Amino acid sequence: MTAEPERNPSCACGSANPSPRTEILRRFKFGVVGLAFVSVAAVLLLVSIVGERLGLLERAFSHVPGWLAVVLVSLGGYPIFWGLIRDLRRGRVTAHAVMTLGLAAALAVGEYATAVVIVFFMRAGEYIESFTVNRSRAAIRALTEAAPETATVRRAGQEEAIRAAEVQPGDILVVRSGQRIAADGTVVEGRAEVNQ
């Protein structure tokens, strides 16, 4: 197999190996936080739907001064608004820009209940995005950790074990049954099935 390694030595991916106990606690904690978030979201959504149907939200927000509603919405949406400002400075327009425009319009016409619901959904979306990004990072870290640390290369007719990071383009790797492949390459001799 002719090796064409594509390793980035500056990447610290997978450098920390958490203990199994730490990993279980982290997953449990994240699962509990996620369950709590979904539970609170479900209750708030139910209250919002029932409250809207019965007109309770409009009556409740009719007693809230406009300035207080703006302050509450600003505090609740602060992380999103700050991220929006950073994105706009970089010349990027995201979905947050459109939602913020809708939020500003709702506040301008005095629809405070609508503004609160928009902020809630913006924060919920941000949480879900963060959750999926963290899961993706964990999957990439696990994949990186699955890479073998050593490789067997054939140089001058002799096989020698070296660190996988030392594999050079043009090296011929020897991969035996059950071993992990240390670098990308082309099969030059032999046949086998590879489970990617």
Image: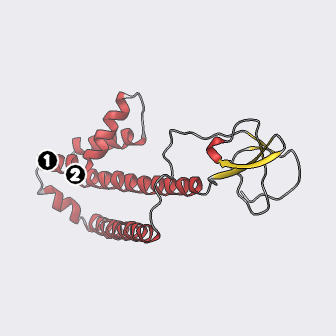
- The tag earlier along the polypeptide, 1 or 2, is 1
Q: Are marks 1 and 2 in contact (CB under 8 Å)?
A: yes
For mark 2, what is the residue?
Answer: 112
Q: Observer-nearest residue: 61 or 53?
A: 61
- Report crowding for label 2: few under 14, some 14 to 19, many 20 or more residues within 10 A (C-alpha): many
Can residue 105 be seen by looking at this rendering? no
Q: Residue at x 22, y 62 (%)?
A: 57
**Residue 121's x, y, as percent?**
35, 55
Q: Is residue 117 left or right of residue 31?
A: left
Quarter occupied by residue 178: bottom right
**Residue 27's x, y, as percent?**
43, 68
Q: Residue at x 59, y 55 (%)?
A: 143
Q: Is residue 57 left or right of residue 165?
A: left
- Which quadrant is home to the C terminus? bottom right
Quarter occupied by residue 165: top right
Q: Residue at x 42, y 38 (%)?
A: 94
Q: Amino acid at mark 1?
A: Gly
* Residue 89 - label: none
Q: Observer-nearest residue: 184 or 52?
A: 184
Query: Vertical placement of 33 versus 189: above or below?
Result: below
Q: How many marks?
A: 2
Q: Is residue 183 left or right of residue 191?
A: left
For mark 1, what is the residue?
Answer: 66
Q: Amino acid at mark 2?
A: Tyr
- Which quadrant is home to the N terminus? top right
Residue located farthest toward the right when viewing the structure as drawn = 190
What SS does tag 2 mark?
helix
Q: Residue at x 17, y 61 (%)?
A: 59
**Residue 142's x, y, as percent?**
55, 58
Question: How far separated are the C-alphas under marks 1 and 2?
Answer: 8 Å
What SS does tag 1 mark?
helix
Query: Vertical placement of 60 versus 82: above or below?
Result: below
